[in-house]
Image (cartoon, rainbow, N blue to C red):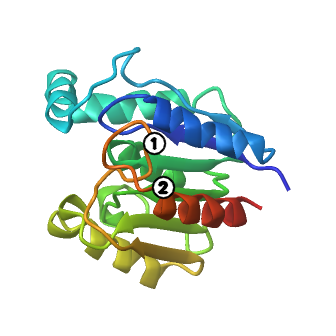
């Protein structure tokens, strides 16, 4: 069965690695929308990306993601990589008709949004077990709470400490872990 996915990039922008993941999902027969929330800007370090995000504002990045969904079907799976998770999570949690959610490298407390997590909305969360951003910033706790509160939720922790390990275009890439992520995502989407 084919799914339609709205996929949001991370703080480095719409990198070749993000496009590669979108292409893998497309190759499996899914429709994937991967909007560029940074208007073509791509960064090589987290610091540069965060600097740009601070200039335009975190709320603006999320708002751009929300707007990207306006012209799309509501019958959709929302996916976000790190900085892209807030928009994906807000849409999945509050937009009627959501089919599911995929969160990579981040998860917010469901209390951040106006409505509770829909109990029957399936979600997968993928991160490394020693990623300081995921563990020390409380995302792991939010992910565990979400898994406990939802009927169809899975948290997958991979060995390692890299943050953006799924992006093949940057040094933190972990090919073996990403291969397993893609397998699990494709199972989820089917």
Residue 168 shows which numbered tag? 1
Location of residue 174 (image quadrant): bottom left
Question: Which residue sits furthest bottom?
Answer: 148
Q: Which of 184 and 107 is in front in this view?
A: 184
Place of residue 73 in the rendered image (x, y in percent of width and height, measured from the top left): 71, 37
Q: Which of 159 and 136 is in front in this view?
A: 159
Which structural element holds mark 2? helix
Q: Tell me, yes or no, whether the two marked residues, 1 and 2, touch with CB atoms within 8 Å.
A: yes
Q: Distance between the residues labelled 1 and 2?
A: 7 Å
Q: Is residue 30 left or right of residue 106?
A: right
Q: Residues within 10 Å of mark 2 (few under 14, many from 20)?
A: few
Residue in the image at 36% along x and 39% along y? 10
The image shows residue 13, relative to residue 118, as above or below, that is above
Location of residue 46 (image quadrant): top left
Residue in the image at 45% along x and 57% along y? 103
Q: Earlier in the sequence, mark 1 or mark 2?
A: 1
Q: Residues within 10 Å of mark 1 (few under 14, many from 20)?
A: some
Which structural element holds mark 1? loop
Residue 175 shows which numbered tag? 2
């Amino acid at each position: 069965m084919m799914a339609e996915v709205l996929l949001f990039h991370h703080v480095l922008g719409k990198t070749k690695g993000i496009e590669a993941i979108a292409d893998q999902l497309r190759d499996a027969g899914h429709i994937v929308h991967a909007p560029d929330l940074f208007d073509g800007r791509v960064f090589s370090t987290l610091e540069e990306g965060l600097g740009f995000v601070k200039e335009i504002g975190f709320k603006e990045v999320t708002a751009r993601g929300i707007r990207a969904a306006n012209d799309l079907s509501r019958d959709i799976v929302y996916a976000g990589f790190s900085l892209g998770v807030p928009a994906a999570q807000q849409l999945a949690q509050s937009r009627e008709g959501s089919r599911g959610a995929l969160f990579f490298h981040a998860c917010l407390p469901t209390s951040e949004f106006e409505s509770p997590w829909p109990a029957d909305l399936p979600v997968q969360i993928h991160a490394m077990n020693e990623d300081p951003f995921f563990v020390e910033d409380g995302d792991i706790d939010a992910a565990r709470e979400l898994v406990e509160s939802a009927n169809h939720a899975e948290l997958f922790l991979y060995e390692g400490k890299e943050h953006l390990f799924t992006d093949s275009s940057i040094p933190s890439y972990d090919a073996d872990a990403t291969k397993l992520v893609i397998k699990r995502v494709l199972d989820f989407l089917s």
